[in-house]
Each structure stands twice: as structure tokens, then as C-alpha cells.
Image (tube, rainbow, N blue to C red):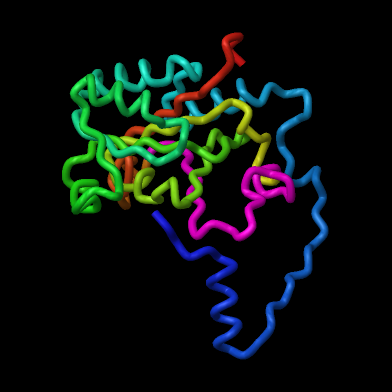
């Protein structure tokens, strides 16, 4: 799952050109033009509504019930083979429950993982780095734990999203203290806003041609539902 970070890549290019790194000048920005979510809005409710509006299925779960809901969801979809990220939220208890339910779990350490990902895996299960309330999007960041292909290749994508990772908008996503303020930057950030979509010249919309046709977010909340 490893990848070359942006900082490492740019450093190599600069070294090859014999030039030092230049810091881009930050342009002024009027918050009123880019921030569309009011401070009084409920981010969890807004995210859920916007996500459903773009075709994402949202299921509220708790930490304790995540595994149970995941197994039931996969069985309902008649899925027998999945690939999971290595995030601690998808730990041994969930993996053991899947195995006990007869659902095979494969990872990128297995032989011919890429071939099986295309041919056999019915669902890629990831843990989202953040959710964006304004657009109903989830941010999937590639890392040693998260393979970018998991959210792009299988016909179905399930993302776990703890509710405290929801931010108001894309500005908050990239702020200096936001969830994507990573140093060095990841090699890939995928913003998922609903299922994969395409349309022909007549404007007929079709889901799932270039990626997952079904996207489900397991929104992990506390016992009080928040």
C-alpha cells in the first residue's frame, strides 16, 4: 500500500533540475465566498442528508455494532469475498466475525492480490479520513494502511467514518489543522461523492462504469446517536 509522497516526489524533481524548492505565495481568500456551511448547522445531519442526496447509503452504527452491521450488510448483498484496509477500526474482532460468517477476507499481502481484487472481491472496505458535510463527500487518503484501489476497483465500496471526522466544507478539510494537514502529504487523496457515474452523448446517467456502483458509509456514532 506504500506510495511516494508529494514532498518526496517534488524533492527529487527539484534535485534533478538543480533548483531549490520554492514556496508558493498564499493568495488572500474571502471566507464569505467559499464557506457555505453556517456555524450553527448540525454537521452530522447535514453530511447525512447531502450524502444520501448524491446516492450514498448512510448507516449509523456504534463501535460495538460495526462488525454486526457489516456482516449483515455483506450477507444481504450476497458478497462472499472482501478486501479490508489495515486500519485498527477493522481489527481482529471484525475479521474474525467475517471469517465465522463464511466471508473470505483478502489483503494486499496475499499472493496475486491485484488479480483477485479485480476478479473476485465484491466489496472494498476502507476507513475514511474525513467526511465533508457541505458536499456529502468522504476523503480516502492512501497510506501504508489504506490502499487507494480499495475505494476504486471493487463494484461496491463501504467506508467507515467516525462522526468526529466530519468537517464543514473543503476549506476545513485542507486547513492547517484540518484532517488532511499531513506532512509529508499522501500520494493520493480520493474524494468520493456518491457512486461512480458516467453518461453517454444523450445524457443517460449510468452508475458503476468506472468504479464502485454502490457506496455505503457506516457512520460511527456514540451511544447517544451523535
Q: Using the rendered image of the protein, determine whether residue 129 is visible from the camera's viewpoint.
A: yes
Q: Residue at x 23, y 20 (%)?
A: 100
Q: Residue at x 55, y 87 (%)?
A: 16
Q: Is residue 61 magenta?
A: no
Q: Residue at x 43, y 15 (%)?
A: 65
Locate residue 225 relative to residue 1 in the image: left or right. Answer: right
Name the residue nearer the viewer: 45 or 62: 62
Q: Using the rendered image of the protein, determine whether residue 207 is visible from the camera's viewpoint.
A: no
Q: Which residues are magenta?
A: 172-195
Instruction: Give the number of callouts.
Output: 0
Residue 41: percent from left, percent from top = 72, 24
Q: Is residue 183 magenta?
A: yes
Does residue 66 sit above or below 211 in this rendering?
Answer: above
Does residue 179 sit above or below 65 in this rendering?
Answer: below
Residue 72: percent from left, percent from top = 30, 16
Does residue 34 sit above or below 26 in this rendering?
Answer: above
Residue 79: percent from left, percent from top = 21, 28
Q: In which quadrant is the C terminus drawn?
A: top right
- Toward the top, the furthest residue is 224
Q: Residue at x 19, y 53 (%)?
A: 112
Locate residue 125 relative to residue 140 in the image: left or right. Answer: left
Residue 45: percent from left, percent from top = 61, 20
Majority SS type along the magenta span: loop
Amino acid at each position: 500500500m506504500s506510495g511516494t509522497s508529494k514532498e518526496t516526489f517534488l524533492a527529487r524533481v527539484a534535485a534533478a533540475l538543480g533548483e531549490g524548492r520554492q514556496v508558493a505565495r498564499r493568495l488572500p481568500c474571502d471566507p464569505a465566498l467559499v464557506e457555505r456551511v453556517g456555524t450553527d448547522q448540525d454537521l452530522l445531519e447535514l453530511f447525512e442528508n447531502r450524502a444520501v442526496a448524491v446516492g450514498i447509503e448512510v448507516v449509523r452504527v456504534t463501535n460495538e455494532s460495526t462488525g454486526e452491521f457489516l456482516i449483515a450488510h455483506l450477507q444481504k448483498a450476497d458478497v462472499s469475498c472482501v478486501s479490508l484496509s489495515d486500519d485498527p477500526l477493522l481489527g481482529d474482532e471484525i475479521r474474525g466475525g467475517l471469517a465465522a460468517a463464511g466471508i473470505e477476507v483478502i489483503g494486499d499481502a496475499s499472493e496475486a492480490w491485484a488479480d483477485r481484487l479485480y476478479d473476485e472481491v465484491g466489496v472494498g472496505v476502507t476507513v475514511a479520513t474525513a467526511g465533508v458535510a457541505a458536499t456529502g463527500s468522504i476523503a480516502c487518503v492512501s497510506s501504508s494502511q489504506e490502499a487507494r484501489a480499495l475505494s476504486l476497483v471493487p463494484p461496491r465500496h463501504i467506508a467507515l467514518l467516525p462522526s468526529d471526522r466530519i468537517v464543514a466544507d473543503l476549506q476545513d478539510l485542507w486547513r492547517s489543522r484540518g484532517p488532511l494537514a499531513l506532512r509529508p502529504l499522501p500520494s493520493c487523496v480520493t474524494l468520493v461523492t456518491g457512486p461512480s457515474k458516467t453518461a453517454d452523448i444523450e445524457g443517460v446517467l449510468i452508475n458503476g462504469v468506472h468504479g464502485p456502483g454502490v457506496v455505503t458509509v457506516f457512520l460511527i456514532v456514540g451511544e447517544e446517536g451523535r
